[in-house]
Image (cartoon, rainbow, N blue to C red):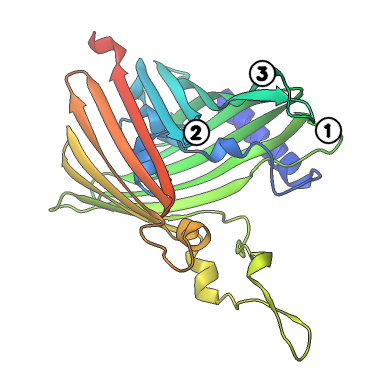
Amino acid sequence: MKQLRFFMFSFFVLNYISVSGQSGGNAVYNFLNLQGSAHAAALGGNAITSYDEDLSLVYQNPALLQRAMHNHLALNIAGIKGGIKFGDVAYARSYDKAGIYAVNLHYISYGDFDRRTIENEKVGEFSAGEYALSFSWSKPLDSNLFIGASLKGIFSDMDESSSAGIGADVGLTWIHKENGWTASIVAKNMGAQISTYYNEREKLPFEIQAGISKKLKNAPFRMSLIAQQLQKWDITYIDPSASTIDPLTGEQQVDDITFLDKLTRHLILNTEIIFSKGFQVRLGYNFLRRAELGFEQRRGMAGFTGGFGVKVNRFQLSYARTVFNRAGGINNFSIATNLSSF
């Protein structure tokens, strides 16, 4: 109970800080929202209700951390065009009375750059990257309800500019194994900058997510409905370049955003086809990505994701493909193992 009281106290303190601080933009440290896990990436970028024996999902929802992950190691990596790489590495260990703990290093590397003068003369090189070291804890409140929390230190290095911060995630997961229902709610990225790039303090990308999933009893399907960005109703982005000027009134005209459009931007739909413990196919659809990242004239497969998981000997391998628009997407790869099996 001491751990529970500590994390609940941290939840309220960091939540107050995260919503009360000044902001020089929408948020800082947005790399925290990148999905290194191929399992989560294949499901539309969110798998907070997937109560599987997969340590890579704990970064999304600390309440998914379970004793079956004792001595598990997971490695996730993804790449973006231009030499940008991101991912994380995680390890978990269980203790009889204290619960289960995990450590996770989440990172993004922006690559190496030339330092040049105004005359375009090369005078050196520099690199840039951001890192978050998380410590997670989880414990069952009863046979069906689990609580989890993560405390993370954040560091950002942009050549001569750097910043540090502290953040926390808190999650609750309810499971009804007999009927195949799972429900979760997560508050993510509560906290604040400790040191800033310049003089203005910025907010962390605080977010509330909730979801529900159902595993069909007589079919190999698990279907989920995830709601994201619940801390704000209207998350519509209006592109200023897309607006027009009425030639008669001179007023700016923008496209009307309907109630349904605002609602669906919060939603992610996904399905897992569980052929066996050793092979699964995963599909997802993210409404927000399609609305904001798809090309207006030719949206193609924007917002769709897909992938699979397969067990080979002692290793669980996963792959995911995320499509942002016709210009390309991201490939995610994950590998996990139980070190005790060796």
Q: Position of residue 319 (x, y in %)?
A: 30, 35
**Which image quadrant: the N terminus?**
top right
Q: Nearer the viewer, residue 252 or 5?
A: 252
Marked residue nearer the N-terminal end (2 or 1): 2
Secondary element under disc 2, as helix, strand or loop, is strand
The reply to whether residue 225 is in sight is no
**Horizontal placement of 172 versus 10: left or right?**
left
Q: Which residue is painted at 26% across and 44% down in the image? A: 177
Q: Position of residue 80 (x, y in %)?
A: 47, 36
CA separation, marks 2 and 1? 34 Å
Q: Which residue is mark 1?
A: 198
Say what amino acid the circle numbered 3 marks: Glu
Q: Secondary structure at mark 1?
A: loop
Q: Residue at x 63, y 45 (%)?
A: 206
User: From mark 2 to mark 3, how far is it between C-alphas?
Assistant: 42 Å
Foreground residue among 134 and 217? 134
* Residue at horizontal 26 percent and vertical 28 percent from the top: 317
Q: Secondary structure at mark 3?
A: strand
> Which residue appears farthest toward the right when viewing the image?
199
Contact between marks 2 and 3 (CB within 8 A): the answer is no
- The numbered disc on residue 125 is 3
> Circle 1: is it few (<14), some (14-19), or many (20+) Cα within 10 Å?
few
Q: Residues within 10 Å of mark 2 (few under 14, many from 20)?
A: many
